[in-house]
């Protein structure tokens, strides 16, 4: 007993004669296990240093007079498809980081000292501070050396083992990332707003950018952080409440990387996301009071009564390392269409076909060959072609509504490239400018807003996929909801109502006629009325039989394809998007189904009536 008391006196004296002797309980914070300390774990010994250090008889080797019993566990390190610091062997935790894990892996109780046996303690560590032996949810450390370069790394990290931190506080240990690269165990509140023993103020991503470089440009490689400095997440001044659990700082901009990434115990182990896939975006983009001003409630578009793009499910999951062309794996999580490090807030709506700034930095597929990757995409439709182009394994989902079967087809009804390209006989001008050789008497000068009365964007010579496929309450055309095809109460994620003619048997009676239809925004063809004057159409300004067909109740869909002519057919000339739905029309006896624009005639059977 006398010997132990002498040791304690020596320890306290030694602490007083060193820098650590100036440490107060406020400095050590949660690492002060003394009765008067602020740790949730309370010990009976009053010497703060003793719980970790011993002046004599500590753990051997080069450890700093270590007193806490070391863990003997093996660990599962971080790994993902985009992690390039891989090797054939599992990396061993370095001596430096082992000291931290002797408490933080949760397998060794605090107070199990090497020099003095079991020091009596009570209480328990906070759950978020216990990492376990599976470290997949923690930022990688004790890497397999040498550190491999990457487009988003500070160049000197790999070349010379130096970070870009101008203060020198963030530093590698023996050329490696260790716990002490980011944490100083002796001072809890260097960062006053995030008292997590950080080596420096971590607000605005300062700690992260000591090693990750948003400004680096490398030939032939894409830096995912390249546009971070000007992105909406980097500059947003929206305040954040603590209960949102997106970091310790007061605004989205100050939280920076922490808004989406969690350096320890992340539930989304790959890339340390705070939530899996779209769940990472929920905290801020699902309404409520987590941020102020409130961000548009994107997730309301997937609520009851609406249907949106399919979230990943089962084996149809998203991964940041997947190919841009989504073969056999069609899904649409937020980051398939939005690059969170580059996205900007939409303040205006430029003319098509350029990508909206909310999708800045997102990849796409070239319409020229349907396979060439564009990273980033330039035009809005290129991002859509990740799923709606040449990718294989696409499935028709009945949840999106009726899908016509067109007489003239390129074979894959879900590949829109042949339908929109310039060589198509006729098409809506999505991938090319409008063909002035075929003037449209019914075409409005401006698209109509969602009220069907006030004028919206100028018609121009080209249009976007989202001019038809859009949230039904989007704010670009007069609503209060988010822009883009997130979800809609109308089939096929259409912005407005559009009814399809349907029959139980091809050529027989159509079961959903709309005789003398309402031509307003509430009517069955409201989507067409966004760009076309329906009154002119029923006045036969473009076709002498329009009024009779429409007033008898037949939908535009019976005769017209919405996208374009995906192929050619010797019997159908194909102007004016005339391409019959063969689920509705049938052959006229032995005659083939025909359409000839020059003769203004067709041959077919529809609604039990033979034409021709």
Image: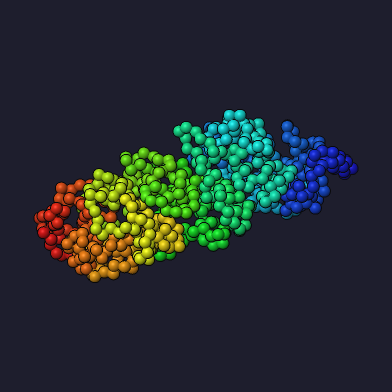
Toward the right, the furthest residue is 2
Nearest to the observer: residue 542 or residue 385: 542
Please identify the quadrant where the C terminus is shown: bottom left
Residue 83 placement, left or right of 442: right
**Residue 263 pos. (x, y %):** 60, 46
Report the colour scheme: rainbow
Please identify the quadrant where the N terminus is shown: top right
Q: Is residue 490 visible?
A: no
Residue 438 placement, left or right of 350: left
Q: Name the residue rendered at 72%, 41% in the picture.
A: 69
Q: Is residue 49 visible?
A: yes
Residue 144 placement, left or right of 348: right
Marks counted in the figure total 0
* Image height of 235 relative to 63, above or below: below
Q: Name the residue rendered at 73%, 49% in the picture.
A: 30
**Residue 390 pos. (x, y %):** 32, 44
Nearest to the observer: residue 336 or residue 249: 249
* Image height of 484 relative to 503, above or below: above
User: To which quarter of the image does residue 307 belong?
Assistant: bottom left
Q: Name the residue rendered at 84%, 41% in the picture.
A: 16
User: To which quarter of the image does residue 530 belong?
Assistant: bottom left
**Residue 556 pos. (x, y %):** 25, 61
Q: Name the residue rendered at 64%, 45% in the picture.
A: 202
**Residue 152 pos. (x, y %):** 53, 38
Nearest to the observer: residue 242 or residue 543: 543
């Amino acid at each position: 007993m006398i010997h132990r008391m002498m040791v304690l006196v020596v320890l306290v004296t030694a602490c007083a004669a060193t820098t650590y002797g100036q440490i107060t309980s406020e400095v050590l914070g949660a690492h002060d296990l003394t009765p008067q300390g602020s740790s949730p774990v309370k010990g009976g010994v009053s010497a703060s240093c003793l719980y970790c250090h011993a002046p004599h008889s500590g753990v051997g080797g080069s450890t700093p007079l270590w007193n806490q019993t070391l863990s003997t566990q093996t660990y599962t390190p971080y790994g993902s498809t985009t992690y390039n610091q891989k090797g054939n062997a599992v990396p061993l935790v370095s001596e430096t980081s082992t000291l931290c894990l002797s408490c933080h892996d949760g397998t060794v109780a605090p107070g199990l000292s090497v020099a003095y046996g079991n020091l009596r303690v009570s209480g328990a560590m906070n759950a978020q501070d216990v990492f376990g032996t599976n470290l997949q949810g923690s930022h990688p450390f004790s890497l397999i050396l040498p550190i491999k370069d990457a487009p988003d790394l500070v160049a000197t990290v790999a070349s010379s083992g130096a970070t870009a931190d101008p203060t020198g506080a963030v530093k590698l240990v023996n050329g490696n990332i260790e716990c002490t690269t980011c944490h100083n165990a002796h001072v809890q509140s260097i960062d006053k707003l995030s008292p997590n023993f950080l080596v420096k103020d971590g607000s605005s991503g300062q700690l992260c950018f000591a090693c990750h470089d948003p400004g680096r440009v490398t030939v032939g490689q894409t830096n995912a952080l390249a546009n971070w400095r000007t992105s909406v997440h980097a500059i947003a001044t929206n305040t954040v409440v603590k209960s949102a659990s997106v970091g310790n700082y007061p605004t989205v901009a100050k939280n920076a990387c922490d808004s989406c990434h969690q350096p320890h115990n992340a539930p989304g182990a790959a890339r340390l996301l705070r939530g899996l896939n779209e769940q990472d975006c929920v905290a801020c983009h699902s309404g409520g009071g987590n941020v102020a001003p409130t961000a548009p409630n994107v997730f309301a578009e997937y609520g009851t009564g609406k249907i949106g793009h399919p979230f990943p499910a089962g084996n149809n999951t998203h991964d940041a390392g997947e190919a841009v062309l989504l073969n056999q794996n069609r899904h649409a999580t937020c980051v398939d269409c939005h690059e969170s490090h580059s996205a900007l807030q939409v303040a205006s709506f430029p003319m098509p076909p350029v990508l909206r700034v909310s999708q800045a930095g997102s990849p796409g597929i070239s319409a020229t060959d349907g396979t060439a990757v564009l990273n980033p995409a330039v035009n809005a439709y290129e991002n859509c072609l990740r799923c709606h182009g040449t990718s294989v394994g696409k499935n028709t989902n009945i949840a999106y509504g009726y899908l016509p079967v067109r007489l003239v087809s390129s074979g894959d009804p879900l590949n829109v490239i042949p339908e929109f390209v310039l060589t198509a006989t006729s098409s809506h001008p999505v991938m090319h400018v409008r063909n002035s050789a075929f003037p449209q008497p019914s075409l409005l000068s401006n698209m109509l807003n969602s009220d069907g009365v006030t004028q919206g964007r100028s018609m121009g010579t080209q249009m976007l996929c989202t001019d038809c496929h859009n949230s039904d309450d989007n704010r670009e055309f007069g609503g209060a909801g988010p822009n883009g095809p997130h979800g809609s109460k109308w089939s096929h994620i259409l912005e407005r109502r559009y009814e399809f003619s349907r029959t139980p048997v091809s050529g027989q009676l159509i079961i959903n006629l709309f005789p003398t239809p309402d031509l307003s925004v509430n009517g069955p063809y409201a989507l067409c009325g966004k760009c076309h004057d329906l009154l002119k159409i029923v006045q036969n300004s473009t076709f002498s039989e329009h009024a009779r067909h429409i007033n008898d109740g037949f939908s535009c869909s019976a005769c017209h394809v919405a996208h374009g002519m995906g192929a050619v057919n010797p019997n159908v000339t194909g102007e004016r998007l005339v391409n019959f739905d063969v689920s509705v029309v049938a052959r006229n006896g032995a005659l083939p189904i025909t359409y000839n624009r020059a003769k203004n005639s067709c041959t077919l059977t529809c609604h039990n009536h033979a034409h021709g």
